[in-house]
Image: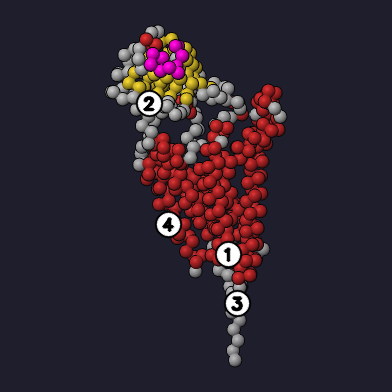
Amino acid sequence: MATTNAPKTPGIWGFLIVDRYMLRQFVQTFLICFCSLTGLYIVIDAFTNLEEFITYSRDRGSLMVIMGEYYAYRTLSFFDSTSHVITLIAAMFTVTWIQRHNELTALEAAGISRWRIVKPLIAVAMIIIGLKVANREIFIPSVRESLSSNAQDLGGSRGKQVVPRYDHRTGILLRASGQAYANEKRIEKPDFQLPRGLDRIGSRIVSEHAYYKPAEEGRPSGYLMREVSQPADFAEYPSLALNGGPPIVLTPKDTPWLAPTDCFVVSDVSYEYLVANSNWQQLSSTWDLIQGLQNSSLNYGAKERTAIHSRVVQPVLDLTLLFLGLPLVLTGSNRNVFMAIGVCLALVVAFMLVVMGCGILGDSYLLEPSLAAWLPLMIFVPLAIALSLPLRS
């Protein structure tokens, strides 16, 4: 009787051993890369801003506690920015490593396909992508006040420039000749320009300070203007409404909780939207961005609309990047680890250039925001599928 020498496919325990081996190698590489890059960032940034930390700690407590809290928040942001790249590096390094030691050949000789070999890597990559989404939508928004201040403004007491903004719902131009202070959400020397319909007491409201107040029960969101100097007789007039709607400028004459020298300007334009170079929207959740899109006071443009679409497609883009990189090392014969990392970096650069280029086109109204966000998927998904086909054979 003839005998066959065909390799037998390993049973479930054999697969579990292979999966555990691949996962251990991947996780080790991912943690080493992430911890090394994070540590390098912290060391460079800490030495650059050490004087600011020492000065701030003199009044606020332990230097190590302050720095630990500061960089713990930055680690969340760093993970969001780098996790997709580190995931690709770890996956390509793992595959190249088993190729280098002829382990891939041995696994294939045992009847395990290349697609089956990388399945655990894809599974853990999807878990990392899920963690990135949770980090972006839950954890970062919860600490965005801390992330929005740099080392030069640890307590939020450093003044920032105010960018004039229109409240598109009321027509009020929110501006100031002074600066804004994040720790109090205070604007120094505000000078609000009133539109027609609200200018019965004058075209401007000028005061010493304005404090942003979020909406509370019985009071809308807006700016509490203290020590109003113009118009001088504003307290003698009742609150001003626009086109028969609810009051927009509240005065002490019919608002008991206002002091005689104060007034309240109703606005859904938040304090953060008035601060120059603010990354508040980048630190907001997708739900917050969508709510801002529905806010008639803000009148979001192409940049914000592109950002919302980009949030939706980002997990798919991260997974697409992985499927672009893995076939490059699985279908090749190169076993040089450093060459694999070089190929990975070149791929990431090309990928990011296309994504950033599409984003710029969307922000500049040269493409529809939705198309600008989805176009990278239209370009790279067919390429990733074509590169991955040989792995399934």
- Residue 210, image x and y in percent? 47, 19
Mark 3 or mark 1: name the one nearer the start of the chain.
3
Q: Evaluate whether residue 53 shows in this view.
A: yes
According to the picture, the residue beneath numbered tag 4 turns out to be 382
According to the picture, the residue beneath numbered tag 2 turns out to be 167
Q: Which residue is located at x 41 percent, y 44 percent?
A: 309
Q: Residues within 10 Å of mark 1 (few under 14, many from 20)?
A: some
* Dot 2 amino acid type: Asp
Q: CA distance from mark 1 to mark 2?
A: 57 Å
* Dot 1 amino acid type: Ile
Mark 1 or mark 4: name the one nearer the start of the chain.
1
Mark 3 or mark 2: name the one nearer the start of the chain.
3
* Dot 3 amino acid type: Pro
According to the picture, the residue beneath numbered tag 3 turns out to be 7
Q: CA distance from mark 3 to mark 1?
A: 16 Å
Observer-side mark, 3 or 2, equals 2
- Residue 43 position by quadrant: top right
| Prevailing secondary structure class for the magenta stretch in the rendered image | loop
Query: For this view, does 83 lie left or right of residue 25?
Result: left
- The N terminus lies in which quarter of the figure? bottom right
According to the picture, the residue beneath numbered tag 1 turns out to be 117
Q: Which residue is located at x 64 percent, y 35 percent?
A: 69
Q: Evaluate whether residue 231 shows in this view.
A: no
Mark 4 or mark 3: name the one nearer the start of the chain.
3
Q: Secondary structure at mark 3?
A: loop
* Dot 4 amino acid type: Pro
Dot 3 and dot 2 residues touching (CB under 8 Å)? no
- Magenta-tinted stretch: 251-261
